[in-house]
Image (cartoon, rainbow, N blue to C red):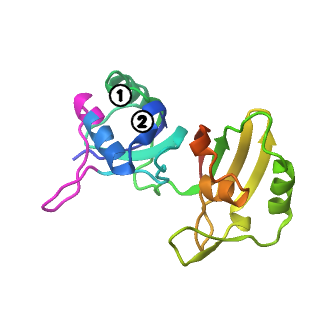
């Protein structure tokens, strides 16, 4: 039986940002089925398609360069796969690149994630100073609402900068002891209400360890 592992880069934008991860997985399954692509399925009473998303995207955040891996039960090449998928993608889903992976190779391991958040112009007063305080701190513990466990935010923030078009950040997800998302960083900067004020959050890159 043919088993072909493929890594796909895709974008999830517009209203599609409002669907959850499980709905996204069902969306992918429909697209593959309509494209006539044979997916491999797990064994057991409730077989599921063999596909993984190494960095699930939170609801409400757009993804410009997302990663998923799928195992197919047929042979194909990357260009042909993209050609067959494209006509069946719903609005907001765009297949951007595909790579056939070596047989028996490791699954994708995410090293870091890049995000950007639109900021009103002019930016909130004191924001550059708040960014500097966070970056210069040796420790910045945070506790999420309704949770008792504290997370050490500072070592997870690899980059944080205020640009002309918004706030950019790069977050480490390879460390032990918890992970942080862009909303944690915004809350630490006093910008927890930014999205409610109309700002958009986007994940611009999923950086995979080679």
- Number of labelled discs? 2
Name the one closer to the observer, 142 or 4.
Answer: 142
Residue 145 or residue 39, whichever sits in front: 145
Q: Which residue sits at x=54%, y=78%? A: 148
Residue 41 in the magenta stretch? The answer is yes
At numbered mark 2, what does the secondary structure look like: helix, strand or loop?
helix
Task: Tell me the residue at 29%/47% (across/down).
Answer: 3
Tag 2 residue: 16
Reply above or below: 139 against 8. below
- In the image, which residues are magenta? 31-49
**Residue 175 x/y as whole percent:** 63, 68
Which element type, helix, strand or loop, lies under badge 1?
loop
**Residue at 35% across, 28% down:** 90
Closer to us: 167 or 113: 167
Q: Is residue 192 magenta?
A: no
Judging by the rendered image, the residue that carries numbered circle 1 is 90
Local crowd size for mark 1, using a 10 Å CA cut-off: few (<14), some (14–19), many (≥20): few
- Left/right placement of residue 31 relative to residue 114 reads left
Residue at 47% x, 54% y: name it: 54
Q: Is residue 145 above or below residue 164?
A: below
């Amino acid at each position: 039986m043919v088993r072909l592992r493929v890594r796909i880069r895709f974008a999830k934008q517009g209203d599609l940002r409002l669907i959850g991860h499980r709905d996204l997985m069902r969306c992918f399954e429909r697209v593959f089925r309509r494209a006539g692509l044979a997916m491999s399925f797990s064994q057991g009473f409730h077989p599921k398609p063999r596909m993984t998303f190494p960095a699930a995207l939170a609801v409400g955040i757009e993804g410009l360069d997302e990663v998923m891996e799928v195992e197919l039960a047929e042979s194909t090449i990357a260009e042909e796969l993209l050609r067959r998928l494209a006509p069946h993608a719903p609005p907001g889903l765009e297949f951007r690149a595909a790579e056939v992976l070596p047989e028996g190779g490791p699954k994708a391991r995410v090293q870091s994630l890049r995000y950007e958040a639109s900021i009103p112009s002019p930016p909130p007063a004191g924001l550059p100073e708040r960014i500097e305080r966070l970056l210069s701190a040796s420790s910045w513990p945070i506790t999420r609402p309704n949770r008792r466990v504290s997370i050490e935010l500072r070592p997870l923030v690899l980059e944080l900068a205020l640009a002309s078009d918004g706030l950019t950040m790069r977050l480490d997800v390879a460390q032990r002891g918890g992970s942080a998302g862009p909303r944690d960083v915004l809350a630490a900067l006093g910008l927890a209400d930014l999205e409610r004020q109309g700002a958009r959050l986007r994940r611009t890159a999923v950086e995979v360890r080679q």
